[in-house]
Amino acid sequence: MGKVLSRVKRPFQNFNLESRVHKIISQEKPVPAPKYESVQLEIERLMKDNPEEFQEMVKKNEILDKHLKNVYVTSKSEILKPSGSTNVVKPLPLNRSSYEDPVFGIVEPENVPKGRVTLPNALQFITNHHANAAKCSVGHICEKYVLPEETVRNILKYCRTFEVYVPQNKNTKAKYAGPSIRRIKVVTRKFKEINSGEPKTEK
């Protein structure tokens, strides 16, 4: 039904459309859109408090309008053209292999500066040191990776790799794989009871 009504109303809407458009365009100043009530009240207040300044702001400045009409922008510089031939064919990439995700989720840099070490290398020398401290000593690590001795000692002291313990069968009891010396000691102490001031009742 709506489609039928739109077809019926369209000829009436387009009737004498061109002349109506020319009439609106030929007007010297277009009719402004209606303002909100709060905006209209603010304009009236400004007209009442500062009538001269308001009229000066609304009035067209002929001098500025004349200066604006005399301003022209002309470009005299030549358009920069690209050097060489325009039909340059870019070479295709030589490496067409698919991208592989990094092992630890971080892309390793190609060049590692002195005094720095990558995550896989750090995990490697931590594991080797805890497996055989005599073979993979602190001095050997410092010499190989060019690291300060204090930094290497702190890494080996506070960092360890995870180890997986797989039991032989289901009945095998779990073994404690942590440090042999307990770092937390629970001390039980009997504290003095606080008297609330109420008389004790014998049960």
Image: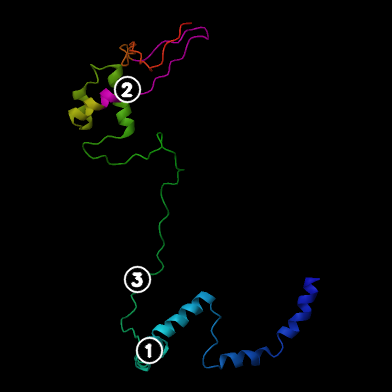
The one of 52 and 162 positioned closer to us in this rendering: 52
Stretch in magenta:
155-178
State if disc 3 and disc 1 touch (CB < 8 Å).
no
Hey, what amino acid is under mark 1? Glu
Rendered location of residue 187, percent (x, y)? 32, 12
Q: Rounded to the nearest whole Å, what is the CA distance between mark 1 and mark 3?
A: 58 Å
Mark 2 Cα-neighbour bin, 10 Å: few <14, some 14–19, many ≥20: some
Q: Rounded to the nearest whole Å, what is the CA distance between mark 2 and mark 3?
A: 57 Å
Indicate the secondary structure of the residue bearing disc 2. helix
Residue 177: within the magenta? yes
Q: Earlier in the sequence, mark 2 or mark 1?
A: 1
Hey, what amino acid is under mark 3? Pro
Model colouring: rainbow
Give the image quarter of residue 137: top left
Q: Is residue 12 above or below residue 159?
A: below
Residue designated by label 1:
52
State if disc 3 and disc 2 touch (CB < 8 Å).
no
Q: Earlier in the sequence, mark 1 or mark 3?
A: 1
State if disc 1 and disc 2 touch (CB < 8 Å).
no
| Magenta: main secondary structure | loop
Closer to the eye: label 1 or 3: 1
Residue designated by label 3:
82
Residue 6: within the magenta? no
* Residue at x 74%, y 85% (from the top left corner): 12
Indicate the secondary structure of the residue bearing disc 1. helix
* Residue at x 24%, y 21% (from the top left corner): 136
Rendered location of residue 96, percent (x, y)? 45, 46
Residue designated by label 2:
127
- Residue 104 visible in the picture: yes
The one of 145 and 49 positioned closer to us in this rendering: 49
* Residue at x 67%, y 88% (from the top left corner): 17
Indicate the secondary structure of the residue bearing disc 3. loop
